[in-house]
Image: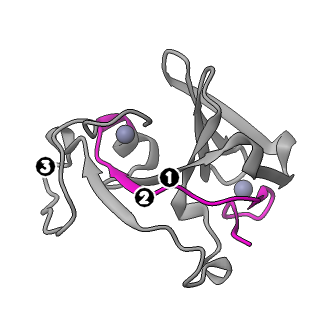
Amino acid sequence: MITGGCLCGAVKYRLMGPLGDIVHCHCETCRKTHSSAFSSVAAVADTDFQLLEGAGKLSHFESSPGKLRWFCQSCSSHIYAKREGAAHVILRLGSLDNDSLNAGNTPRERSHIWTSQQAGWYQNDTELPVYDEAEPVAGR
Ligand SMILES: [Zn+2]
Ligand SMILES: [Zn+2]
């Protein structure tokens, strides 16, 4: 079973179902939020996302209308984002526990998105598909 949590250990979760494909988002909002080149994310159904510990430690920031980014108040690790009305959370994959991943449950990397806003210092040498903005499919 895939598990994850924040840096300080206050927030822990597990996934009761599969993760969607991995997308690396280079939009300015993700860059600033994570203070990194991009944010690696995947969707997981609300019903498959189970918070085990630290619900009271989570705080959120509304980065765009109706989209909340949830993070640990103690260590500031970002755990997931959620759009109002969506039936899934957008999990921040840096929070996954590596030792809970195996050949059978590890999602695949799908693409880099919003590279029109990528960091000026970043050299994208990926072999994955690259999109200037969102992927031309719904669901993100
Ligand atoms: Zn924490
Ligand atoms: Zn983004």
Q: Is mark 3 within 8 Å of ligand 2?
A: no
Q: Is residue 104 above or below residue 11?
A: below
Q: Which residue is mark 3?
A: 120
Q: Residue at x 50, y 52 (%)?
A: 42
Say if 3 sits above or below 136 in the image.
Answer: below
Quadrant for the N terminus, please: bottom right
Label 1 crowd bin: few (<14), some (14–19), many (20+), radius 10 Å: many
Q: Cβ(mark 1) to ligand 2 < 8 Å?
A: no
**Residue in the image at 45% along x and 49% along y:** 34
Q: Residue 9 vs residue 32: left or right?
A: right
* Residue 132: percent from left, percent from top: 15, 40
Q: Which residue type does callout 2 highlight?
A: Ile
Residue at point 13% right, 68% down? 125
Cβ atoms at labels 1 and 2 below 8 Å apart: yes
Let me know if residue 128 is in the magenta part.
no
**Residue type at tag 3:** Gly
Q: Identify the image quadrant of residue 70.
A: top right
Which numbered disc flags the more N-terminal residue, 3 or 2?
2
Q: Is residue 61 above or below residue 107?
A: above
Location of the C terminus by quadrant is top left
- Residues 102 and 26: in front is 102
Q: Earlier in the sequence, mark 1 or mark 2?
A: 2
Magenta residues span 1-29
Q: Quadrant of ligand 1?
A: bottom right
**Which residue occupies the foreground of this view, 87 or 69?**
87
Residue 58 on image: x %, y %:
75, 41
